[in-house]
Image (spheres, coloured by chain):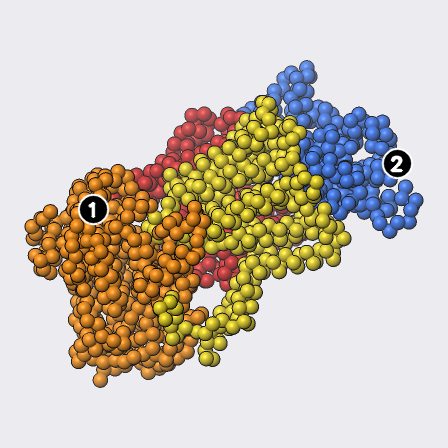
Amino acid sequence: MSNSMEHVSQSRLISEASLKERIIDLVTKWEFILVVLFLAVVVYFSNASPYFLDYFNMMNTTFNFMEKAILALPMIFVIMCGDIDISVASIMALSSFSMGYASAHGASTGGIVIIGLLVGLLAGVVNGLMVTGLKIPAIAVTLGSSSLFRGISQAVLEDQAYTHYPESFGYFGQGYVGDSLVPFELLLFVILAAVMGFVLHKTTYGRKLFAVGNSLTAARFSGVPVDRIRFFNLALNGLFAGIAAVLLTSRIGSTRPNIATGYDMEAITLVVLGGVSITGGKGNIVGVIIAVFLLGYLKFGMGLLNLSAKVMIITTGFLLIGAVLIPELLNMLKSWRKLKKQQQD
Amino acid sequence: MKDIVLQLKDIAKYFPGIKALDKVDFTIRTGEVHALIGENGAGKSTLVKIMTGVYQPTRGSIFRNGKSVQFKTSHDAQEAGVVAIHQEASMFSELTVTENIFMGHHLKKASGMLDWKAMTRHTADLLNKLELDISPDTLIKNLGTAQRHMVEIAKALSVDAEVVIMDEPTSALSLKEVEELYKIVRQLKNEGKAIVFISHKFDEIFEICDYFTVFRDGQYIGEGEVAKSSIDEIVKMMVGRSLNQMYPKKEAKIGETILDVEGLSLPGYFSDVSFNLHKGEILGFFGLVGAGRSEVMRTIFGIDKKSAGKITLAGEVLETTNPGLAMKKGIAYVPEDRQEQGAILEMSLSHNITLPQINDLSDFGVLNSKREKNVTEEFGNKMEIKAANWKVNANTLSGGNQQKVVLAKWLATNPQILILDEPTKGIDVATKAAVHKFISEMAGEGLAVIMVSSELPEILGMSDRIVIMHEGKVTSLMNRDEADSDKVILAATGHGQGDRHE
Amino acid sequence: GGDKAADAEKTKIVLLVKSLGNGFFEAVADGGVEAAEELGNVESIYMGPSSATAEGQIEIIETLIAQKVDGIAISANDPDALIPVTKKAMKAGIRVISFDSNISSGGREVALAPSDTNLIGQQQVKLIAELCDYKGEIAILSATAQATNQNAWIAVMKEAIKAPEYKDMKLVDVVYGDDAADKSYREAVGLFEKYPNLAGIISPTTVGVLAASKAIEDEGLKGKVQITGLGLPSEMQHYIENGTCGQMALWNPVDLGYSSTYILARMIAGDIEGKAGDKVDAGRMGSITIGPDGETIMGEPFVFNKDNIAKYASIF
Amino acid sequence: MNKKLEKILQNRELNLVLLTAVLLIAVTLRAPSFLALKNIERIVNDTAILIMVASGQLLVILTGGIDLSVGATIAFSGMAVSMLNQYNPSMPVVVLILLGVLIGTLLGAFNGACVAFGKVPPVITTLGTMSIFRGFTFVLSKGQWVTAHEMTEAYMNIPKGKMLLLPNLTIWAIVVFIIMFYFIRYTRSGREIYAVGGNKTAAHFVGVSEKKVNFMVFTIAGALCGLAGVMWTARYAAAVNETALGFELQTVAACVLGGVSLAGGAGTLTGVVMGALFLGIINNALPVVNLSPFFQMGIQGFVVLAAIVANVLMEQRNDKKLLAGRRR
Ligand SMILES: Nc1ncnc2c1ncn2[C@@H]1O[C@H](COP(=O)(O)OP(=O)(O)OP(=O)(O)O)[C@@H](O)[C@H]1O
Ligand SMILES: Nc1ncnc2c1ncn2[C@@H]1O[C@H](COP(=O)(O)OP(=O)(O)OP(=O)(O)O)[C@@H](O)[C@H]1O
Ligand SMILES: [Mg+2]
Ligand SMILES: [Mg+2]
């Protein structure tokens, strides 16, 4: 036999996994746990509140978390490479501020959107240049730049607000797709998630991301343009912050320097809850997407029961830890069982 | 018969999906240097880790001076007088030499405070003993590979142990340090200590070992006295068959110049390095560790940025370069540190092997798993990588097999110029022969090869010409027929001025 | 009146506040419960985001729309940002009013101001003037730069101080403590540093007035630098009793929650439209008249000093 | 410069001293009174809490982790102790301080247990407990504040009084600094932190228990937050739900400015203290220099960023010099 198995299989390899083991493998998978949690949320709240399992409501509540979900998409890339960006919320503020400025000076809807995206991109580029050009860790750069970006909008806008946007600008954050009940924001997220998922799992760029995340040095020695990738990630993060800023600004129809406060931490929460390793090199877009809806509907359900926001943050905190702890404990159990079985052979 | 100090009985170690060790017996005696021999992946390092409490055996028992013991952590092993120099780099690069040596067993004053003065003094003594000219306060990150390895040796010696295990201690050392190490090993032996010595180099085994044990595929095969055996016999036990030729250098037709390096400099590392390379040629680079060979290669490959000099590739001057560009121009570089630079440990073998040419294996940036599979299988099999399948992560492989993955990944790019930095470091004899045969064949097909190596027989046996470096400068250039070990070593130590040929 | 129909479903009225964990709003909630009990068939729900952001309030309003509550009274973190979502709520048949910190017109039906903006601003200036004998340098320590009600009051104060009786007083600076104890404290100390002759500070925010009082006490400036502002009696009792803060003002948050609930209940029951000129029968608060553009004023801010602080500290 | 001093202050710290000097000069040019002795004393005192908490953060970062829950831990322990003080005014302050430390220790131990024994990465653990602890602060206080009137004089005097010419709070910080310095430099456990952060495999090989170290650093960080909680609430005479909101980023910033590697294994306590003082100077200078308050945030971001960039550039230059000098 001259096929691959010749050298690959060896006498001491343990026989193929049994069905039972495969089921255990599946059960301890992160995505599986997330799906189970998601279903648990749906089942529980459908019983607890008559308003939960309502098509309009389920669609409508996505308005609450789509901007954060969109922020989470490129954040997967950034975190995958072992970096982190805590300035996205501030980029949103800067971008929203620029849109308000443009609108106040008579820009059309198209112009406003383009300016919002460009400013986001530009801010991301600034982050990227400092991280890769000056070789400063991303967390240090974005720690500083987050005050800077928001500070710029505050310095100019002071205690004022931009409140006048063209009528048609409202569509991005408030509109629905055609006559359906599907919010435009949701559709946009689905499209962006599909694109980003494809890039992550099916393209060379994605493969290189995993390489950089696992070993920056080895990736560099393999000809992967490490710095270009990290730069590109941060720039992309800026661009997506621009997109999120367009949506949020359109949704609330006004801009103040404190817009989107706390969005960065929420986006990062989604990414880590989705199973992306904070040290880089491990992750999956599906996990993050499930995490988005899990957290979104959990909050929605708890809101319907009029639970205090403080109960919600406590629950989110435990969920975050539990989502890692449970598979970890199951995994420990799994390896223990496996070894035990081997010993019996 | 000497006293038995440490005995392992019926040891087994299972990892999920693989039996690294099964039914292994191993006995160590005082005043003896005991060679542990086996192919890559035979389970040698795993056994070391079991003996030092890093791993817990799945089954079996350990006896220390006849008493059954359990080493829950390496601390327990150390208390029982068992220490090891591990195969994987295990240094704290941001800490000083002193701290690296005493981590885990810092010296304390009567008051309970750490006694830095005493530790520094001890370190200075140890460094003296090893004839290492570095200050105890130097940070490890400022040391070269060989110096780091020597510090590891010093670390093992800092504990007053009865059993000292050395897992491929010489793989990153050059002649001078190896001599130093032999001296130490002999001294320890005379002091009545037991030494376990793991190496793939038979000259070393025959030079300092008294006794040997052979493993194959995680199982005990046999043992014997070194003096009463031959290389052939041992190789047969190891591989299951005999090997004939170690350095199968084929005569190759030397073609036109493909690479011309002139006055290349990188301050702090090397200066004014010039040489050229022809198609079909194997150009050996020899020097003591720290001579700056690796940096020259890294600069050519574009990892480090040159400060002066000219690199001409196939008639075209390369102004600035980076690894991506160098690869496009047909240069492949197999780095010396496979853990850090070579393999991506948490990625699958397949993804590792295809990474350098992932762009070419894809359709407009979209991955093509079929093509990836083909390349993986072709080169993985060529290098005889032993693994459960191509989807396992590289970190589950033995050290030698990891090196094969790194080789496979670069050979798969079909380079015009192949730069190998210590290509057979940590590789067993059988594979080494295969790698050599392979390099030779590739050169025969017109590939230009640069081979950096600290192993003199390898350099002498494989090279068409030899460049010798000393402290960042090229001191000599010899043709195959005029080179001999004395002349090469002399040039490498900065003495004798060999003739310079162009 | 609630005894028209014997429906088991109670009218759900939500008091949506700026954020949880603030004594002022906890007192507002008490007022809501009090009104609900009086009204009988009303369920008073107290909600707020965990930190004071408009985005957080929007999230809550969306779920309130989903569960079809009957009315929402909002103390808004942003007068403009909430408009699209409150419009959506009104379209879904929910009655929306704002109280305390109001939503701009178009985003609510009635805006119940605790007091008249002009009145508050003028009163603050008068309080500090009385404390420092109508002379000296005055500074303002506000919450965040984006707090709308604060900004409106500050604008009035800037105007009011131009009056002839304040000719010897000068407003030298406006600083922002972001409603954080440490930053407010630091800003207060910064004021002492920058203006060695500072005579008084106005801090129209509960966190700020507390932190500034502490700073005055710590720096040994009691008597030299006066402090007034808007503060909760229970929180400021110490400084008023020991004389650091001679007097300060606030409206009754319990009444605010009480009135809001009454107004909403009457609107939901169809007793009133919520238009200008409507008169609301608001229980113990008597009759409240809705002004032009839905703007309604509850009453005058109440002044607290050594004599009455103990009595009110036990209430809110 | 003196060789010994140079050894104590590593390159990075020297750089930071330089940057701090530049910052001080810049501020003094705008506000000449800033450099007065009294004011410097005040800045140090104002930075004392940051120094305490940042030195705990240092330990966590040295292992390669991060503690995002410090602000919430301060809030919870501060609230708990203030309420104890409120309901048992006779309880001696020593007991209150010890209880504060104990509560912080327990919260830190919870973090530590999740990280060490549950293998939950530090960021996730503390991102979670950041919410959990703050949520419980609210549950504990039922949304109410504890203010000066409910606190005893003795409690409020913990940070306030003076001893040996220095404010008590500053003395507390100095004591914490000395203990931490001794711990990091002169105990095995202290050194093991560097081992785990520097190279986990190597640490394992020399018998250093990663679990023990992880558990320990979070517990110590928690204990310091507990102490800080007492100091904070006593100093501002107010225990509120939002106490120390966002403080985690300040402590991380102090570490980053102080040259601590976020990858773990490298960093010194003196660096962190200087990083904290640098931030303290900015925080105290911003209200004093005559600039629109609306510029504060932007300027703070700019100065921090500039300091980080300058620090990195100076260090890169030093490295180059070191290299060039190595081989002539
Ligand atoms: N952590 C691990 N998880 C899974 N498998 C492992 C692990 N460590 C080692 N193995 C497997 O155990 C076997 C023995 O490995 P070991 O490192 O002991 O070999 P070795 O004899 O030291 O080889 P070399 O000469 O290449 O260093 C190999 O097949 C390897 O793939
Ligand atoms: N004088 C010196 N002092 C400290 N470190 C040095 C000195 N000279 C060289 N080094 C270190 O040694 C390394 C340069 O040696 P390098 O590894 O390039 O040598 P080499 O000839 O490639 O050896 P090999 O590949 O056999 O290990 C550098 O990493 C550098 O940090
Ligand atoms: Mg090995
Ligand atoms: Mg080298």
State the SS at label 2.
loop
Chain A drawn in what color? yellow
Q: Residue at x 72, y 53 (%)?
A: A53
Up-down relation of residue B494 to residue B102 (above or below): above
Q: Position of residue D293 (x, y in %)?
A: 54, 28
Chain B drawn in what color? orange
| Residue C237 visible in the snapshot | no
Chain under label 1?
Answer: B
Q: Is residue B485 left or right of residue D83?
A: left
- Indicate the chain coloured blue by its letter: C
- Indicate the chain coloured red by its letter: D
- Seen as rendered, the residue at the extreme top is C164
Residue at which label 1 appears:
B258
Please name whichever residue, D260 or C88, is drawn nearer the observer in this view of the structure. Answer: C88
Q: Position of residue D325 (x, y in %)?
A: 22, 43
State the SS at label 1.
strand
Residue at which label 2 appears:
C271
Please name whichever residue, B55 or D135, is drawn nearer the observer in this view of the structure. Answer: B55
Q: Is residue D108 left or right of residue B28?
A: right
Please name whichever residue, A295 or C23, is drawn nearer the observer in this view of the structure. Answer: A295
